[in-house]
Image (cartoon, rainbow, N blue to C red):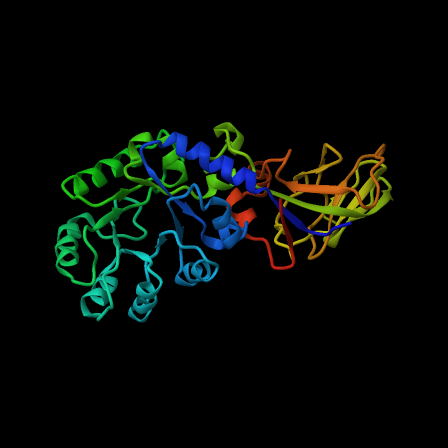
Amino acid sequence: MKAATAIIRTAALTHNIDVIRAMAPNSCTWAAIKANGYGHGLLPVANALASQADGFGVARLDEALKLRAGGVVKPILLLEGFYSADDLPAVVAHNLQTVVHGEEQLLAFEHATLAHPVTVWLKIDTGMHRLGVHPDDVSDFIERLNTCPNVAKPLHFISHFGRADEPEHPLTQQQIDVFTSLTASQSGFKSLAASSGTLMWPTSHFDFVRPGISLYGVSPVSERTGADFGLQPAMTMTSSLIAVRSAKKGDAIGYGGRWVTPRDTKLGVVAIGYGDGYPRVAPDGTPLLVNGRRVPLVGRVSMDMLTIDLGPDATDRVGDEVILWGEGLPVEEVAHHVGTIGYELVTNLTSRVDIIYT
């Protein structure tokens, strides 16, 4: 009998990247594996995708260094760039590529003495207004980066969508138009689409797509699941029943007595809680899967346990497996009940969750 366990199917990862590459057949693929491979394991995901991905995208330098230390030799792109001029020697030493999104990073390149030039992707703020160079300043950045000996030529270009998961919203097409107009005369590679763009906006594919959450079989689009796009869930989050108890009508369950039994029933206690990363805010009725049927969460999630209503005629036993999300229960559905997104659930697992790769 196992407590909180995440089962990762590497075959699902390879299936999903094949699906994504088929959607963008004329583009190369940066596989985004930041945040510990979206909770699936940084190095295991990189190894699983090594033969299909053209390179890997990470958020932070330490993630890139872990990949290099683990033997990953493919190109690695720092999607947030480097945080300090002191990071540049490591960028050079480990043959990393970096985004430049602001004046401080540009100045660091202009004042550094480096062993060899670095491949740079200039990030343009095309309308999300989070990171990136304002369109009015792009020509100045291009000129300065092109004259900087520490920057490898040609310069490449990148941006990020703010609302590509909303197919009717006009911002995405506006961003495509801005990006196209600012980079059309440039010879370097161009990249705009992450998961939503790759799945839903073919005109945004350009030279590189950057799938993230979709690699793991999770939909980036609300009200849709990965299966709607032909994707398979890579993670199945499981635990076990550690108790099956009879409850009488009117019993108040768990901390604060949030849920009161409306009938005589049987309750299951599952060995998982917010100490494992399951959301404490999950409301009554959030679905779980026991022996092939959906049952509701009842009562407040505690640190190590949660309670489910098995029903008055249940025959479930201590030791039976419980699926929190994954095979048979899309994480997107669970996230909808919780009021969050699948990204958050899969990346919030704590260190005590056992991870098994199959």
Residue 9's spot in the image, x, y percent? 59, 42
Kindly identify the residue that appears in the image at 45 percent across and 50 percent down.
33
Kindly identify the residue that appears in the image at 49 percent across and 49 percent down.
47
Compared with residue 81, is residue 307 higher up or lower down, i.e. above or below? Answer: above
| Residue 163 appears in the rendering | yes
Residue 95 placement, left or right of 180:
right
From the viewer's side, name the closer residue of 248 and 166. 166
Q: Where's the C terminus, which quadrant?
A: top right
Tell me where residue 114 sits by quadrant. Answer: bottom left
Compared with residue 217, is residue 256 higher up or lower down, i.e. above or below? Answer: below
| Residue 225 appears in the rendering | no
Q: How many marks?
A: 0
From the viewer's side, name the closer residue of 76 and 305. 76
Residue 241 placement, left or right of 30:
right
Residue 278's spot in the image, x, y percent? 63, 50
Tell me where residue 24 sits by quadrant. Answer: top left
Kindly identify the residue that appears in the image at 31 percent across and 69 percent down.
89
Residue 316's spot in the image, x, y percent? 82, 38
Compared with residue 340, is residue 107 higher up or lower down, i.e. above or below? Answer: below
Compared with residue 112, is residue 325 higher up or lower down, i.e. above or below? Answer: above
From the viewer's side, name the closer residue of 215 and 11. 11
Tell me where residue 333 sits by quadrant. Answer: top right
